Image (cartoon, grey):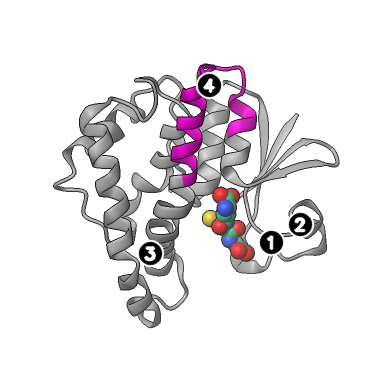
Amino acid sequence: MLRVYGTSASGNCHKVRMALEALALPYAWTEIDPGRGETRTPGFLAMNPNGKVPVLEIEPGTYLPESNAILWYLAEGTPLLPSDALQRAQVLQWLFFEQYSHEPYIAVARFLRRFHPDPESQRALAESKMSGGYRALEVMEGRLAQERFFVGGRYSIADIALYAYTHVAEDGGFDLGRLSAVRAWLDRVRTQPRYAAMPR
Ligand SMILES: N[C@@H](CCC(=O)N[C@@H](CS)C(=O)NCC(=O)O)C(=O)O
């Protein structure tokens, strides 16, 4: 059976839960607490030498880290990943956008403000993430003002990847108030069949 080594409050890990639930795949979940050093143990590093969750155990001894690689693996051959070559490339476009232009700002600001043991000491660093985060949200707003979903007018892993941290962006101090297309899309994602809410 598939097993996820993940941290429930992490958006990167939540992407994996959303895909597994949407696809009705049976899986087990092992909760990992990075705050207690559980991503630095020899056993964990043997699964992912980069020391980060999520990791998907496909079968004993076969491990796949990196949330968006996991999404791609799970979605192959399902409605969550188009078969058309251009649309597949467009899914990759948004997965790379998420990892380079969105997550490093929105997820990091959220971590510093909500999960860091001393958020006050991190205030300046968190503030430095805001303009990049808003830039990413504006890019999303532009796309979603034209399209119901990111690629091909259909719900895909591009939506799951971007939903994961956007729906909790307020934890990072981001105000989604004027981003009406983003807010409407968040609602559309929430009403997908077998939608899984983030454990809070
Ligand atoms: N690019 C990676 C990022 C993974 C990542 O940053 N994971 C964080 C939690 S969201 C983590 O494991 N932090 C704990 C650590 O670095 O020890 C992915 O998308 O999976």
Q: Is residue 77 magenta?
A: yes
Tell me the quadrant of the picture where the N terminus can be found: top right
Kind of residue at badge 2: Phe
Earlier-in-chain disc, 1 versus 3: 1
Position of residue 115 measured from the top left corner of the image (x, y, whole percent): 45, 65
Residue 184: image tag = none
| Residue drawn 48% across the image and 41% down it | 95
Residue bearing mark 3: 109
Kind of element beneath mark 3: helix
Q: Earlier in the sequence, mark 3 or mark 2?
A: 2
Query: How many C-alpha atoms fall within 10 Å of the one at disc 4: few (<14), some, or many (≥20)?
Result: few
**Mark 1 — residue?**
39
**Residue 140 x, y percent position in the rendering:** 29, 41
**Quarter of image, ligand 1:** bottom right
Q: Which residues are magenta?
A: 72-96
Task: Out of 9 and 67, give the one closest to the viewer.
Answer: 67
How far apart are the two marked residues, 1 and 2, measured between alpha carbons? 6 Å
- Which residue: 51% across, 42% down? 14
Q: Secondary structure at mark 1?
A: loop
Q: Secondary structure at mark 2?
A: helix
Query: Tag 2: Cα neighbours inside 10 Å, few (<14), some, or many (≥20)?
Result: some
Instruction: From this view, report whether residue 52 is shown above or below residue 92.
Output: below
Pick the front one: 146 or 76: 146
Q: Residues within 10 Å of mark 3 (few under 14, many from 20)?
A: many
Tell whether circle 1 marks a residue whose Cβ is less than 8 angstroms from ligand 1.
yes
